[in-house]
Image (cartoon, rainbow, N blue to C red):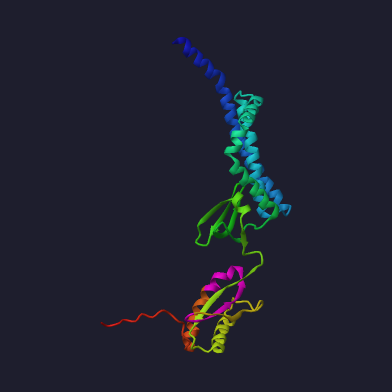
Amino acid sequence: MDKYLEYLKGLIIEFTPKILVALAILIIGLLVIKLIVKTSRKVMNKGGIDLTLQKFLGNLIGWGLKILLIIAVISKLGVETTSFAAILAAAGLAVGLALQGSLANFAGGVLIMIFKPFKLGDLIEAQGEIGVVKEIEIFTTKLTGLSNKEIIIPNGTLSNGNIVNYTTEGTRRVDLTIGVSYDADIKQTKEVLMNVLTSHPKVLKDPAPGVTVSELADSSVNFAVRPWCKTEDYWNVYFDVTENVKLALDKAGIEIPYPHQVNVKK
């Protein structure tokens, strides 16, 4: 028993300094990496580099330095880096297969940085989701949804799918379909609808709003109502125009068809 205790004591005496030094390297290294990333972002900001690219490169630098730090800590614990590299090489195929999704996401992030289909602050639609781009990380892109929910999309699927960027052009067209009774006067209805559009302060004059007959439906004459607005005003215009159209048609005595229920007495 004394022999084992003596052996254990020897191990503690031998490895305690190494563990303490490794912990010190880890803590100091993490602080230094944080400082380097912060400084690199400041340098990139002064250099006029796009904010989206700044954050992506900052994440890339941070992860790269952390990997080097882990190797240094392992080496300080007595594990030879050559042996460590050999182990990684031997396990390379298994790791590659396990991380192929992550590698695809990393490649997708690089493609997004190169082709720039969107940037921070853009309103986009992708993978069935709509939101404002909050952050582009190494493996994922974060959006803030219209109801203020966080949406996380892997960069691999994002870069390989359709992306609709609503912000790029600066303006958007609001597409509304308004149906009125067949008894309504078409010319009068168009005037009423156009007055609603031209009187709204956030509807742009250029491009000009439009009102046209789009369909002769089963129970209504449908009008395509097309106001233009700035991207940030889209939902305000959408809801305001919808409400104002109803009020204006009611005031003009123009009926909007709706299903009627007829009670038959037996």
Residue 121 in sight from this viewpoint = no
Q: Is residue 49 above or below residue 260?
A: above
Residue 248 in sight from this viewpoint = yes
Q: Nearer the viewer, residue 154 or 51?
A: 154
- Seen at 65% across and 38% down, the residue is 65
Place of residue 124 in the rendered image (x, y in percent of width and height, measured from the top left): 60, 61
- Seen at 63% across and 41% down, the residue is 63
Q: How many marks?
A: 0
Question: Which stretch did the figure color magenta?
Answer: 218-238
- 226 in magenta: yes
Instruction: Please state, as top left, top right, bottom left or bottom right, where the C terminus lies in the image.
Output: bottom left
Place of residue 252 in the rendered image (x, y in percent of width and height, measured from the top left): 49, 88
- Going by the image, does 266 lie left or right of 4? left
Place of residue 66 in the rendered image (x, y in percent of width and height, measured from the top left): 62, 37
Q: Is residue 152 above or below residue 193?
A: above
- Going by the image, does 46 lie left or right of 200? right
Place of residue 242 in the rendered image (x, y in percent of width and height, measured from the top left): 51, 76
Q: Nearer the viewer, residue 104 or 181?
A: 181
- Seen at 46% across and 85% down, the residue is 255
